[in-house]
Amino acid sequence: MGETVLICNGEIGIEKVYLEGVQVISVNMGDICHLTLNRPERRNALDGESIADLERALQQADRDPEVRAIVISGAPPAFCSGSDLKELATMSIQEMCDSESDTARVARSIASLSKPVIAAVEGFALGGGFVLAISCDIVVSASNVRWHLPEVPNGWLPPWGLQALLTRVGPVRARLLTWAADVMDGVEAHRLGIADYLSEPGAADQQALALAKRLAALPPAAVASTKRFFEPFVSLDGERLDNLASRHFASNCEGGAAKAIFSKFKVKS
C-alpha cells in the first residue's frame, strides 16, 4: 500500500527523492507545500489509491497554518497520464463510473481550498492528467509538454472535468480539444490559455515554486477571499456537468471501440 508522507524543512531547489511505494510525496518548503505524484512506472496514472492520497495531502496542506501555497507536479517522465486504464479494465462500468466520480470530486475540490494551487507540468499531461492540471488555480507548463485528450478516439467522452476546460478556453475550443483534433505542445497550450505560464523544458517546478513563493508573501486572508470570490465563476455547475459526462461515459463504454481499448489492459489469465 502506498501512503502520503510528509517531509519537513525542505528548501526550494532541493533534490527530490522518489520513494518507491509512496503514491504522493509531500514536502513542506517553508510556507509552500510541494506535492509530487509518484507512480513513474505508470506515468503517474491516477488509480484509486493515488487519488485518495492526493486528496489527503491537499486537505492536510490546506489545514496547515504554515502553508500558504501548494504546488503539484509529477515524478519524471510525466505530470500525469490520466486515469489508470489497467485498473479501470478490471471494473464493471458502474465501478468505473464510481471510481472516476471520486477523481472528479478531488479535482473539483481544488477550487474550494483556501490556498492557491499551482500545477507544474513537464513531460506530458494526457486525459485526466490534462484535466487535473487545469483544475488547479494556475498552470505552469514546460514548452515541450505534450497536452492531449485521447478519450474520444478511445471511444468515450471524458467522464469529468470538462467544466475546467470550458472555463479556460470556451465551449467551441473545448469541444474541438475534446474531439482530440489538436495535440498541443506547451507553447500552444499557453497561447490558448490552457497554461498560464511557460517555462523552459525542465524548469516548470522551479518556476512554479517561485510563483508560489510570491503568492505566499501576500496577505493570506486576502488570497483566500480572492479564491472564494472567483470560485463560483471557475467551477460553475461543475458537479452537475461531471454527473452528465459520467452518464455519457457509461453509455460509451458499452460500445465496441471502448471495449477494444479496455481489453488491451486486462490481465491475461
Image: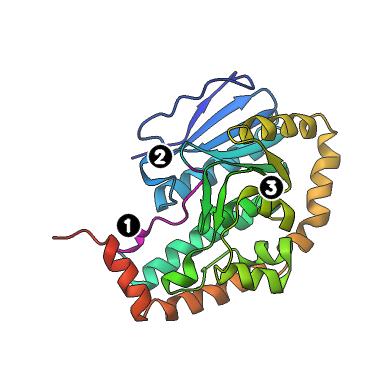
Q: Which residue is pictured at 40% across the width and 29% down the height?
A: 19
Q: Nearer the viewer, residue 55 or 143?
A: 143
Q: Which residue is mark 3?
A: 113
Q: Which residue is pictured at 40% across the width and 48% down the height?
A: 49
SS of the residue under disc 1: helix
Amino acid carrying mark 1 in the image: Lys
- Tell me where residue 238 appears, x and y as whole percent: 65, 67
- Tell me where residue 69 appears, x and y as whole percent: 70, 35
Please report whichever mark, 3 or 2, sits nearer to the chain's N-terminal start. Answer: 2
Q: Which residue is mark 1?
A: 86
Please report whichever mark, 2 or 1, sits nearer to the chain's N-terminal start. Answer: 2
Front: mark 3 or 2: 2
Q: Which residue is mark 2?
A: 40
Amino acid carrying mark 2 in the image: Pro
Q: Residues within 10 Å of mark 3 (few under 14, many from 20)?
A: some
Q: Nearer the viewer, residue 244 or 65?
A: 244
